[in-house]
Every structure is written in structure tokens, then in C-alpha cells.
Image (cartoon, rainbow, N blue to C red):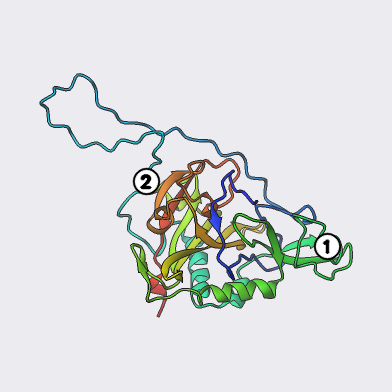
């Protein structure tokens, strides 16, 4: 079972997978195969739990006094996302927003091939024509010779299962298919069922300080599908970071449904502790040593004509 920050968080829907990156540089997947032969990101450090404060009434209050309204948080109740945040076209650093908005147009238009031009591939050393077990780069290396190097894109076939690696053509196809799953006629408390951008996730950066988010972030998209006659919300995640040349590139893709974590963080914005089971940590960017994530509400509707 693939875990992230020690928590199984997402369940894949049949036919929805994740892909990753293109270009000539190297990728930084979260579960780098043993055969990975190019530059990788530093492994994500253990994220620590920030204790949640509690608010309690004192015993000295008169019995007849009218209690003042409180917003207490106990250790068993995770903090909830900040309400009523206003989505923005550019909630983070300006150059990062420019890249993110270009990606959003390609994704919502279902143009996976164009999306790959904004991504960066990972090179893998194939162990042979068939997989030896978990972590081997397949199906990318299907029918490959032992020692052959191929460029591909790490993804997770289920967010609670093993990772896989696909070719650029396969990755482009999967991204293109994202926009075809949602049903605009469906609705829930977060909006209609069409695929659209919802938030940009940044690690260890608080609300109001989005300009500091410019090197590593996740782009969060979502749509509604019908499962057993009920609307179910799918999430699509594109992780972005800067290459050694300073250029922003998408390097990791994900898709699935949240099971357990509160979707309000990703859909309406808010800040949470990564170790909190109520926070969708699977949607956060991989930043070594990070302990929290802020989802900045993101609205790209002005870009779509």
C-alpha cells in the first residue's frame, strides 16, 4: 500500500490514473524507483504534529452569566479550513501564477500534449522486459532490454496502491481524459461537476503570504462524476517545482477521491497541519521538513473564453 506522510488518503476511480512530466530534465517523484538514474529531490522529511490549542471556560464564571460564543478546538477535533476565502487568479508569486495559469488552461481544455510541454520527464534504468516487483518502472519498461534507459512519468495507479511509470504519450492521454470524466449537470456544495481549478497548495506558507510560494506547489483541480447514482468528487493534482536551471516544471500527477480528509481545504482554501488526518496531505507538495500546508483559493475562470 502506497502511503504518504504515513496516511493512505486517496482512492482511485476506475480509469483515472496519474501521470507525470516531460522535457529533457529530471523529475522528482515522491516514491522514486531504485532504478532512477537522474537528479532527484531530497526525500521528504518526517512531518511533525503541531499541537492544536484548546479553549475552555473557567470555573470562576457566574452561573447566571450568559456564555460568550467560543470556537474551541480539542485534540480530537482537527481545525477546520478558514471560511469565506476569496479565490484569486494569482494567489501566489507572480511568475509562479503565470506558469500555473498556463497549465490550468491546458488541463481544462483537455490538451494533454500541450501539458507535457510544461512538464519534465524522469529517466529510468530498465531492469529488463518485465517487472521484478514493487518499484520497478513499468509499464514504461515493457519489452525493454536490461540496462536500457527510458524517459517516463511516475504516477500512482491507486492512491492506496503501487506506483507505476508511463511514457510521455500515455501521460498526455491521461491528462487529456481528465476533462472528459466530469458531468457539469451534477452539483454539490462546492459547485457544479465540470473540471476546474480550485486551489494552489504551498507547504509551510501561511495565508496572506502567498508571494513566498514560488518554487514548489501543487495545482488542485476537481470535478464531479456519478457513482451509483450519487455525485462523487474527483481530484486531480499536478505538482510543480523548479529545475536546477530555475525553470518551473510539472513533475508529478495524481488523481483520485479523498477518503477521510476534509475536501474543504482543497476546494475552499485553508491551512492545516500535514500530520492531521483531516488535512488532505496527499494534495500537498513534497517539501522536505514541511509541517503544514496552505491551500490558496484559485479562480481561473477569467482565462476561459
Asked where in the image residue 29 lies, by quadrant, the reply is bottom right
Q: Residue at x 43, y 75 (%)?
A: 183
Q: CA distance from mark 2 to mark 1?
A: 45 Å
Residue 117 appears in the picture as rendered: no
The residue positioned 44% from the left and 32% from the top of the image is: 51
Residue 284 vs residue 59, the one in the foreground = 59
- In the image, residue 162 sits, relative to residue 114, either above or below, namely above
Task: Indicate the position of residue 266 as horizontal and vertical percent values.
Answer: 44, 56
Residue at x-position 85% and y-position 67%: 129
The residue that mark 1 highlights is: 126
Q: Is residue 76 above or below residue 23?
A: above
Q: Give the image location of residue 274, x and y in percent.
A: 50, 43
Q: Quadrant of the C terminus?
A: bottom left
Residue 67 shown left or right of residue 190 in the figure: left
Residue 144 in the image, given as x and y percentages of width and height: 85, 69
Mark 1 or mark 2, which is nearer the start of the sequence? 2
On residue 80, which mark appears?
2
Q: Residue furthest right?
A: 146
Badge 2 element? loop
Residue 23, given in percent of the width and then of the height, sits at: 69, 68
Report crowding for label 1: few under 14, some 14 to 19, many 20 or more residues within 10 A (C-alpha). many
Few, some or many C-alpha atoms within 10 Å of disc 2 (few <14, some 14-19, many ≥20)?
A: some
Residue 242 lies in what quarter of the image?
bottom right
Q: Is residue 50 something that shows in the picture?
A: yes
Amino acid at each position: 500500500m502506497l502511503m504518504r506522510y504515513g496516511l493512505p488518503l486517496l482512492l482511485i476511480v476506475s480509469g483515472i490514473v496519474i501521470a507525470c512530466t516531460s522535457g529533457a530534465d529530471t523529475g522528482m517523484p515522491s516514491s522514486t524507483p531504485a532504478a532512477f538514474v537522474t537528479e532527484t529531490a531530497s526525500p521528504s522529511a518526517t512531518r511533525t504534529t503541531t499541537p492544536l490549542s484548546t479553549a475552555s471556560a473557567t470555573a470562576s464564571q457566574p452561573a447566571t452569566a450568559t456564555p460568550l460564543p467560543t470556537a474551541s478546538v480539542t485534540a480530537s477535533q482537527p481545525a477546520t479550513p478558514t471560511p469565506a476565502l476569496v479565490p484569486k487568479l494569482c494567489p501566489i508569486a507572480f511568475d509562479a501564477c503565470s506558469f500555473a495559469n498556463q497549465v490550468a488552461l491546458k488541463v481544462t481544455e483537455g490538451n494533454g500534449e500541450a501539458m507535457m510541454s510544461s512538464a519534465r520527464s524522469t529517466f529510468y534504468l530498465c531492469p529488463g522486459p518485465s517487472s521484478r516487483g514493487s518499484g520497478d518502472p513499468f509499464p514504461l519498461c515493457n519489452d525493454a532490454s536490461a540496462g536500457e534507459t527510458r524517459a517516463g512519468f511516475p504516477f500512482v495507479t491507486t492512491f492506496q496502491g503501487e506506483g507505476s511509470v508511463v511514457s510521455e504519450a500515455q501521460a498526455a492521454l491521461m491528462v487529456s481524459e481528465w476533462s472528459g470524466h466530469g458531468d457539469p449537470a451534477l452539483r454539490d456544495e462546492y459547485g457544479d461537476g465540470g473540471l476546474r481549478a480550485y486551489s494552489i497548495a504551498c507547504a509551510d506558507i501561511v495565508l496572506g503570504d502567498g508571494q513566498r510560494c514560488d518554487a514548489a506547489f501543487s495545482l488542485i483541480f476537481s470535478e464531479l462524476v456519478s457513482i451509483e447514482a450519487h455525485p462523487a468528487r474527483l481530484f486531480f493534482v499536478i505538482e510543480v517545482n523548479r529545475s536546477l536551471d530555475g525553470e518551473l516544471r510539472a513533475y508529478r500527477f495524481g488523481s483520485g477521491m479523498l477518503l477521510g480528509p476534509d475536501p474543504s481545504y482543497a476546494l475552499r482554501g485553508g491551512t492545516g497541519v500535514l500530520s492531521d488526518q483531516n488535512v488532505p496531505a496527499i494534495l500537498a507538495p513534497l517539501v522536505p521538513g514541511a509541517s503544514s500546508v496552505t491551500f490558496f483559493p484559485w479562480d481561473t475562470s477569467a482565462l476561459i473564453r
